[in-house]
Image: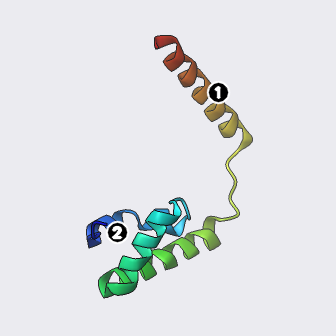
């Protein structure tokens, strides 16, 4: 398995923090972070930032009208793509 470098790990750190990566990627990122003090420090800072954002903005909710507009836009875009194929 190819060794990850710090730039690749830091580019994907939010995937790890948000639990948006599969178990294989998660294990590789964690393995690197556990062995690399600069990445441990960077991960800790990003983790603190995420925690701060959750505390300060976590209760905010987008208006229902925004959700409806986005849903309609996605459906329209999806229909256009299907018609082109």
Secondary structure state at the residue bearing disc 2: helix
- Which residue shows up at 55% across the image and 64% down it? 18
Reply above or below: 85 against 34: above
Q: Is residue 50 above or below residue 84?
A: below
Callout 2 environment at 10 Å: few (<14), some (14 to 19), or many (20+)? many
In the rendered view, tell whether residue 54 sits above or below residue 61.
below
Q: Residue furthest front?
A: 1
* Residue at (57, 75) in percent of width and height: 51
**Front-lying residue, 9 or 14:** 9
- What residue is pinned by disc 1? 72
Using the image, tell me which numbered label, if any, was put on residue 9: 2
| Residues tagged 2 and 1 counted as in contact (Cβ below 8 A) | no
Query: Which is more foreground, mark 2 or mark 1?
Result: 2
The picture quadrant where one finds residue 74 is: top right
Decide if residue 30 is on the left or right side of residue 75.
Answer: left
Q: How is the image coloured?
A: rainbow
Residue at 35 percent of width and 78 percent of height: 32
Pinpoint residue 22: horizontal percent, then vertical percent.
52, 60
Residue at mark 2 to residue at mark 1: CA–CA distance: 36 Å
Q: Residue at x 44, y 82 (%)?
A: 44
Q: Is residue 14 visible?
A: no
Closer to the chain start, of discs 2 and 1, is 2
Name the residue nearer the viewer: 51 or 27: 27
């Amino acid at each position: 398995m190819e060794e990850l470098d710090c730039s690749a790990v830091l580019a994907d750190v939010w995937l790890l923090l948000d639990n948006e990566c599969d178990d294989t990627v998660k294990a590789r990122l964690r393995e690197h972070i556990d062995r690399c003090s600069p990445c441990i420090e960077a991960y800790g800072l990003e983790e603190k930032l995420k925690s701060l954002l959750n505390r300060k903005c976590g209760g905010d909710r987008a208006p229902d009208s925004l959700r409806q507009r986005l849903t309609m836009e996605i459906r329209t875009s999806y229909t256009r793509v299907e018609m082109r194929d």
